[in-house]
Amino acid sequence: MPSVNIHHDRSKRAFTLVELLVVISVITILASLLLPAIQKAMHYARRTSCANNLRQINLAMTQYADDNNGYFAPYYFNNNSWPYCYRFWLKEYSNIDTDYLPMKKNLFYCAEGIPKMAPGSRMANCYAAFPGTPGGFSEMNYCYFAGARLGDKDPPIVNGTNGRKGPVKVSDITAGSRTTIFADLMKFNSTAPYEVFPSAPVRSWNHMDYDATSLYEGDPGGNLAYADGHNRWISGVQEMLSHRQEPGSGKSYCAEQPGD
């Protein structure tokens, strides 16, 4: 009678329940350790994308000035023309939108700021309608600090000057490495505790935790694009307060200028 081989290949046996639970636990622990690093890497990637947007917009403005006797694009100043309104320098008072920049919405909006737009807010409506101006508004995620001011709102600011401590023309620049032309939208009240934007859910900061309400919360920061072509990341309450510009209406915007 032939013998029967009852040897079992132990290498092909299934996991026991205990072994399976151990593997799942190890994977869970590894994922929890890696997730913060992945989130941090994504944060820096969005920050870099934002800096690249500013660099491209800043380069276009430099080219515009080269073609216009050294003058930066002017901007019109009224109740709707804050530094982050593209309508009054990009569309209506220069040819930058037709001759110098591709009008792609993600060039004018920060990848980290887009998810923070509250549905139905002016910023969200402008993003959806870009390059249109819904309700006459034209909010983007970046601020413009150069060019001659047109119109008149605050008596101390004279038409033809800048009003934001920035240069009207290239020859005005005395320190290009400290002259901000464009910056991330970093808007806060002019007095302590420096609320980011009291009338939330409208957000006015690209690189800050969504629930933050003042400069002292949410690890605020932002990119600055300078006249000499370089970009810099700025953060920290004291540095931001030392480089705040106040063009009116009780609001401050972060942008380093030589006169700070």
Image (cartoon, rainbow, N blue to C red):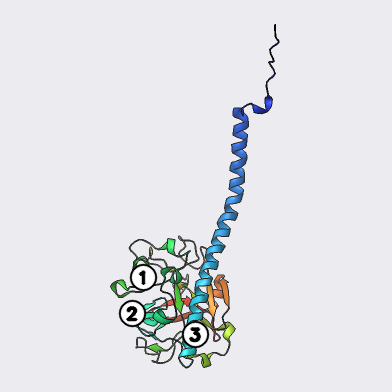
Q: Which residue is mark 2?
A: 79
The picture quadrant where one finds residue 84 is: bottom left
Q: Earlier in the sequence, mark 1 or mark 2?
A: 2
The answer to whether any part of residue 195 appears in the image is no
Name the residue at 28% across, 72% down: 135
Q: Dots 1 and 2: beta carbons under 8 Å?
A: no
Instruction: Establish if 229 lies above or below 32.
Output: below
User: Please, what secondary structure does the residue beneath circle 3 have?
Assistant: helix
Q: Nearer the viewer, mark 1 or mark 2?
A: 1
Q: Amino acid at mark 2?
A: Asn
CA separation in Å, label 1 and label 2 = 20 Å
Q: Which mark is residue 130?
A: 1
Could you tell me how far apart the alpha carbons at marks 1 and 3 are, in whole angstroms? 23 Å
For residue 131, above or below residue 154: above
**Residue 76 in the image, given as x and y percentages of width and height:** 36, 85
Residue at x 54%, y 61% (from the top left corner): 43
The amino acid sitting under disc 1 is Phe
Estimate how packed mark 1 is, as few (under 14), some (14 to 19) or many (20 or more) residues with alpha carbons within 10 Å. some
Question: Image point 57% across, 51% down: which residue?
Answer: 35
Residue under the point 43% across and 61% down? 115
Residue 8 lies, in percent from the top left, at 68, 21
Identify which residue, 207 or 38, lies in the foreground. Answer: 38
Q: What residue type is disc 3 on?
A: Gln
- Marks counted in the figure total 3
Residue corresponding to mark 3: 63
Crowding at mark 2 (Cα within 10 Å: few <14, some 14-19, many 20+): few
- The residue positioned farthest toward the left in the image shown: 135
Sequence-wise, the earlier of marks 1 and 3 is 3
Mark 3 neighbour class, 10 Å CA radius: few under 14, some 14 to 19, many 20 or more: some
The x, y position of residue 59, in whole percent, is 51, 80
Distance between the alpha carbons at the discs numbered 3 and 2: 29 Å
